[in-house]
């Protein structure tokens, strides 16, 4: 993996200002063309401000407004793009071709983690727990999913993040609109140019948890108490009533087991550098893996 700095480098005794200057010119990729553009702009703004505070020569770079070849003027890239065309391996591939070091996972891991259907297949093949799911190609498939999983269930894009386009379906009459929303038929994916893949997922009654992974090591778990029925876009980025509890209040042995599970889930998709694994805990304390975020949101929330 090509990182901004290695552990060995950070352990040198150079003054901090010298170390920061050695990074050279750093482009912070933010914005982009996905349905998560606004979140990415906030994430990138926070990352840029942090880098500047530390003396790094950093500048914002929005690939929706500039040609990628302009990145050749920079020495390194900190990727703060979310969703398609940023978190899915496409930008990573372009940076590989240009020979520019960048943060986070590589091409394959980024693509796999962005594709919930394929990441869930990998987990299931390796014996890791994840809620049952079904790929949906047309509205009628949503009805078949409801017959198989029961209601409520979740319908969501298979290749999007930040809970964009997700619906908790409680009644059969909501299936059609939930499918269209997940696919992007309501115009909530500006600039993407193609419908999103859609999936249904069995509803798991329980608590929301997340585990950050940094340089291969899981950080303390966070219990999420969302405003509303589930952890949707509003609860993540807009609500001031969503609570993030750390320590998570779990038995220490149980937390270590869950952290190891998350680290394994991250490893199986090929994740490197940093990321986050989201999961649910049901009433019996059993974990259910939901997704890997290879470029987690860095907003104030």
Image: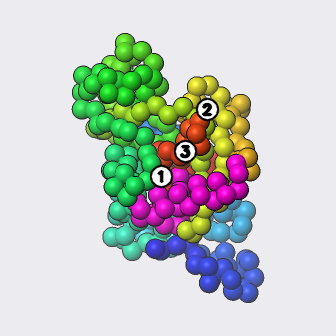
Q: Main secondary structure of the magenta part?
A: helix
Instruction: Give the residue pinned by disc 2.
Output: 235
Front in this rendered view, residue 36 or 203: 203
For marks 1 and 3, give the CA distance: 18 Å
Residue 297, position as x, y percentages in the image: 57, 48
For marks 2 and 3, give the CA distance: 24 Å
Q: Decide whether residue 257 is among the magenta residues.
A: yes
Instruction: Give the residue pinned by disc 3.
Output: 286
Q: Residue at x 38, y 39 (%)?
A: 132
- Classify mark 3: residues with Cα within 10 Å, few (<14), some (14-19) or many (20+): few
Instruction: Please report contact status of discs 1 and 2: CB closer than 8 Å, yes or no.
Output: no
Magenta range = 250-277
Front in this rendered view, residue 248 or 34: 248
Instruction: Give the residue pinned by disc 1.
Output: 292
**Along the horizontal axis of the image, is 230 left or right of 242?**
left
Q: Decide whether residue 276 is among the magenta residues.
A: yes
For marks 1 and 2, give the CA distance: 19 Å
Question: The C terminus is located in which quarter?
Answer: top right
Instruction: Please report contact status of discs 2 and 3: CB closer than 8 Å, yes or no.
Output: no
Front in this rendered view, residue 243 or 184: 243
Q: Residue at x 39, y 24 (%)?
A: 150
């Amino acid at each position: 993996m090509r990182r901004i700095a290695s552990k060995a480098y950070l352990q040198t005794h150079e003054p901090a200002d010298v170390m920061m200057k050695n990074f050279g010119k750093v482009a912070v990729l933010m914005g982009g063309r996905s349905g998560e553009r606004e979140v990415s702009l906030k994430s990138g703004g926070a990352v840029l401000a942090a880098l500047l505070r530390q003396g790094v020569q950093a500048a914002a770079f929005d690939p929706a407004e500039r040609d990628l070849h302009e990145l050749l003027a920079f020495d390194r890239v900190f990727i703060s793009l979310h969703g398609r065309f940023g978190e899915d391996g496409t930008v990573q591939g372009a940076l590989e071709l240009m020979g520019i070091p960048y943060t986070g996972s590589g091409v394959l891991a980024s693509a796999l983690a962005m594709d919930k259907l394929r990441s869930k297949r990998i987990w299931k093949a390796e014996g890791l727990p994840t809620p049952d799911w079904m790929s949906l190609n047309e509205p009628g498939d949503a009805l078949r999913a409801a017959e198989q999983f029961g209601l409520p269930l979740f319908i969501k894009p298979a290749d999007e993040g930040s809970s964009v386009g997700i619906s908790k379906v409680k009644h059969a009459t909501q299936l059609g609109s939930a499918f269209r929303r997940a696919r992007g038929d309501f115009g909530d994916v500006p600039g993407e140019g193609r419908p999103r893949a859609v999936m249904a997922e069995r509803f798991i009654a329980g608590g929301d948890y997340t585990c950050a992974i940094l340089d291969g090591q899981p950080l303390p778990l966070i219990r999420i108490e969302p405003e509303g029925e589930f952890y949707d876009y509003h609860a993540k980025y807009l609500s001031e009533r969503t609570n993030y509890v750390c320590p998570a209040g779990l038995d220490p042995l149980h937390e270590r087991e869950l952290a190891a599970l998350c680290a394994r889930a991250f490893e199986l998709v090929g994740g490197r550098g940093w990321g986050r694994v989201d999961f649910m805990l049901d009433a019996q304390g059993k974990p259910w893996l939901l997704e890997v975020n290879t470029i987690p949101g860095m907003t104030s929330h």
